[in-house]
Image: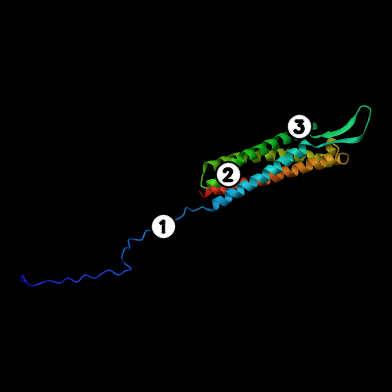
């Protein structure tokens, strides 16, 4: 190559499309499990329904009282829930369940705000199971007494009293139905919490 010769180097100019373009980065995917917020809202609504059912059961049983319009010189025919320890247990148990459900509402709100939080949901699952056990025991025990009040037991000479104390039997029967409605809601709550924890 002589000193007077020049060398030409052709450089292609980049087009307007390729200018200022860097490598494409994938946007971070949203965290899966958005349905958990909906499940938490459903949990909250169910708790409100269970509170209403448990309070209705306790209040109905606690106000069950009927006095027959006729009486003798020594006897007054009266039926009240506190005549039977089973009904007393029912009122106390349903009041405990209703109180627990009211106290659990803030934890349910935490699950709505933080749907991926495991701790509050696990705590609710354990305590819901305990409340379900207490609710079922109280409802089943009261249901047995209500059955005897309606039908009696001729083998043990237990007479049916609902023909005489119709209002009393209607109230205690309604209380038992309300308690089993709260049992159904608590079972649903346990299932919802278990599914949400299973898919963390």
- Give the class, few, some or many, for how many residues have Cα within 10 Å of label 1's Cα (few <14, many ≥20): few
Distance Cα–Cα, label 3 vs label 1: 65 Å
- Give the class, few, some or many, for how many residues have Cα within 10 Å of label 2's Cα (few <14, many ≥20): some
Q: Is residue 190 left or right of residue 86?
A: left
Residue 186 in view here: no
- Mark 3: secondary structure: helix
Residue at far right of view? 73
User: Which image quadrant: the N terminus?
Assistant: bottom left
Please tell me whether residue 65 is drawn above or below residue 7 in the rendered image.
Answer: above
Mark 3 in CB contact with mark 1 (< 8 angstroms): no
Q: Quadrant of residue 143?
A: top right
Q: Which mark is residue 109?
A: 2
Q: Earlier in the sequence, mark 1 or mark 2?
A: 1
- Mark 2: secondary structure: helix
Q: Nearer the viewer, residue 197 or 107?
A: 107
Q: Quadrant of residue 126?
A: top right
Q: Earlier in the sequence, mark 3 or mark 1?
A: 1
Q: Which residue is mark 3?
A: 85
Q: Which residue is mark 1?
A: 27
Instruction: Report the residue at 55% width, 50% height from top.
Output: 37
Q: Nearer the viewer, residue 105 or 21?
A: 21
Distance Cα–Cα, label 1 vs label 2: 31 Å
Distance Cα–Cα, label 2 vs label 3: 37 Å
Q: Is residue 136 left or right of residue 173?
A: left
Residue 82 in view here: yes
Q: Nearer the viewer, mark 3 or mark 1?
A: 1
Q: Position of residue 102 (x, y in %)?
A: 64, 39
Q: Quadrant of residue 134?
A: top right
Instruction: Report the residue at 94% width, 30% height from top.
Output: 72
Residue at far left of view? 2
Q: Which mark is residue 2?
A: none
Q: Position of residue 2 (x, y in %)?
A: 5, 71
């Amino acid at each position: 190559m002589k000193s007077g010769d020049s060398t030409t180097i052709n450089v292609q100019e980049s087009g307007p499309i390729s200018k200022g373009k860097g490598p494409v980065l994938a946007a971070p995917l949203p965290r899966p499990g958005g349905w958990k917020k909906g499940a938490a809202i459903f949990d909250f609504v169910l708790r409100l329904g269970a509170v209403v059912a448990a309070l209705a059961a306790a209040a109905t049983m606690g106000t069950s009282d009927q006095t027959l319009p006729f009486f003798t010189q020594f006897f007054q025919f009266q039926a009240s829930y506190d005549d039977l320890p089973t009904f007393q247990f029912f009122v106390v148990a349903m009041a405990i369940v209703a109180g627990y459900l009211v106290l659990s509402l803030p934890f349910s709100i935490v699950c709505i705000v933080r749907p991926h939080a495991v701790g509050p949901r696990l705590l609710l699952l354990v305590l819901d199971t305990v409340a379900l056990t207490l609710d079922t025991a109280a409802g089943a025990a009261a249901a047995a007494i209500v059955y005897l009040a309606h039908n009696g037991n001729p083998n043990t000479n237990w007479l049916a009293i609902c023909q005489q104390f119709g209002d009393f039997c209607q109230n205690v029967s309604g209380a038992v139905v309300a308690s089993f409605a709260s049992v159904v809601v608590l079972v649903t709550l346990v299932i919802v919490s278990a599914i949400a924890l299973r898919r963390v």
